Amino acid sequence: MKALSLIFILLFPLISSAEENIKSIVEHVDKLYRSNSSVAEVEMQIVNPNWERTLRMNIATETMKHTFIDILYPNKEKGSGTLRKSSEMWNFFPKVGKVVKVPPSMMMSSWMGSDFNNDDLVKETTLTDNYTSKFVSGADKNNYYIELTPLKSTVTVWGKILLTVRKDNKMPITEEYFDEKGVKIRTLSFSDYKKFGDRLIPAKLELIPENKANQKTVIKYSNMKFDLKLPDDTFTLINLQRKR
């Protein structure tokens, strides 16, 4: 028994270290585009076999809880926006002057016709808080491979997510999304790593669905600033409906 106890004591620090390591990696990926506050200039290109469209927008965030998206281009979409406060979300459509609250059941629905869903854009769920994680084997020893499984309480359509991260700088390479049967549904790729201020982030994200040929959505960050003092009314319904 003493021998077994000694083995456990010797192994316990290694187990704890591994758990802390994987937690720090996942948390780093989760918070790449967020801090106490952030403001970003973003372009979204939506491509499918029948048409293409490009959106330009400003995105403001506060911690992991609040998000405000203001669409600037094209003109027919200008003034449209999305507000997320904690677990609540609203869209504003200036043509009809109407604010629509998004129910929880619609969080996995497409945002503005893109391959990203509402939850992707406003991050109602986080990899850190809503998923369990473990290291799995992969082809490249220079990368971490992490399998994320949703908690029972997590509202999601995903059975698991496979996250690939560079070991040298903890930058994400891909997130592969699988349904409950283990079938891959989509792949989110990260590239064009750039420094904005003192923070390194992937400036290009490309989302490709597996079951839709010649279709993808690409997000490009042209500018991003962190830890700014935002106006007090940034994350309000009044600001969402304000003419710009």
Image (cartoon, rainbow, N blue to C red):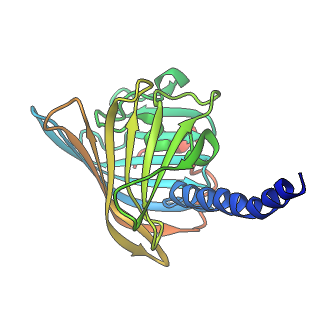
Residue drawn 44% across the image and 35% down it: 118
Q: Is residue 135 above or below residue 13?
A: above
Residue drawn 62% across the image and 35% down it: 87
Tell me where residue 4 appears, x and y as whole percent.
82, 54
Q: Is residue 103 visible?
A: no
Q: Is residue 222 above or below residue 130?
A: below
Q: How many marks?
A: 0
Residue drawn 57% across the image and 46% down it: 133
Residue drawn 46% across the image and 72% down it: 169
Tell me where residue 42 appears, x and y as whole percent.
34, 57
Looking at the image, which residue sits at the far right?
2
Tell me where residue 231 appears, x and y as whole percent.
59, 58
Foreground residue among 13 and 200: 13
Tell me where residue 138 appears, x and y as whole percent.
39, 54
- State which quadrant residue 124 falls in: top right
Q: Is residue 135 visible?
A: yes
Foreground residue among 146 and 33: 146
Looking at the image, which residue sits at the far left?
50
Q: Is residue 76 above or below residue 66?
A: above
Foreground residue among 125 and 169: 169
Q: Taking 95 as reference, is 242 left or right?
A: right
